[in-house]
């Protein structure tokens, strides 16, 4: 079961997305604005995020930029009713994982969500599952998004042949 942060200023669409994700067996974390989404990220790191592009205050691209700086491995899907090819290309060039135009078919949405979750899992961004989680990190207990980011980066580096220099107070 994956945790998916959904961000939309339209309460009806937010609820519809949450219901669809619950139906597919996922946990939906709802946020009605970019600021609310950033606050939710401080509490719990999702496996992926779905955000509306056009919202009052912080729009979807601004939210993506803020999230991407702190959690570069988190796949972000962008929803928009005013989608153009130019907008999609711009978003993808900035690193947005996927771009979905509204109205969308539920199957199309879930295909993109599944694709994002596959990448999230492959990069090690997933947290322990109910069956005990990954064996390499089962002794590490955390709910901190920063620690999850660090563990994801450590797993990614462990799979490469790169040398790593660790520095800091004790390194």
Image (spheres, helix red, strand yellow):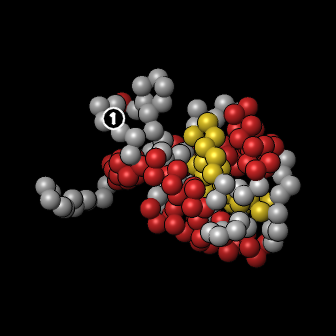
Give the number of callouts: 1
Say few, some or many: other residues with alpha carbon within 10 Å of mark 1 (under 14 / 14 to 19 / 20 or more). few
Identify which residue is drawn at 66% across, 43% down: 114
Compared with residue 114, is residue 168 higher up or lower down, i.e. above or below? below
Q: Quadrant of the C terminus?
A: bottom left
Looking at the picture, tell me which residue is in the foreground, 156 or 61.
61
Q: Which residue is mark 1?
A: 141
Q: Position of residue 116 (x, y in %)?
A: 62, 49
**Camera-nearest residue between 159 and 79:** 79
Residue at screen point 30% across, 59% down: 162
Quadrant where the N terminus lies? top right
In the image: residue 60, left or right of residue 79 = left
- Residue 116 in view here: no
Expressed as whole percent of the image width and height from the top left, the position of residue 138 reads 34, 31
Q: Residue 136, image x and y in percent?
A: 33, 35
Q: Is residue 5 left or right of residue 15?
A: left
């Amino acid at each position: 079961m994956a945790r998916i942060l959904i961000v939309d200023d339209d309460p009806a669409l937010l609820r519809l997305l949450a219901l669809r994700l619950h139906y597919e067996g996922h946990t939906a974390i709802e946020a009605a604005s970019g600021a609310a989404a950033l606050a939710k990220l401080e509490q719990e790191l999702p496996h992926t995020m779905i955000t509306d592009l056009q919202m009052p205050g912080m729009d979807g691209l601004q939210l993506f930029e803020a999230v991407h700086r702190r959690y570069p491995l988190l796949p972000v899907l962008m929803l928009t009713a005013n989608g153009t090819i130019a907008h999609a290309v711009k978003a993808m060039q900035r690193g947005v994982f996927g771009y979905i135009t509204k109205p969308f078919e539920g199957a199309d949405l879930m295909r993109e969500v599944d694709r994002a979750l596959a990448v999230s899992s492959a990069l090690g961004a997933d947290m322990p599952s109910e069956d005990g989680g990954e064996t390499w990190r089962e002794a590490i207990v955390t709910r901190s998004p920063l620690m999850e980011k660090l563990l994801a980066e450590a797993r990614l580096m462990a799979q490469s042949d790169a040398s790593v220099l660790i520095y800091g107070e004790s390194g």
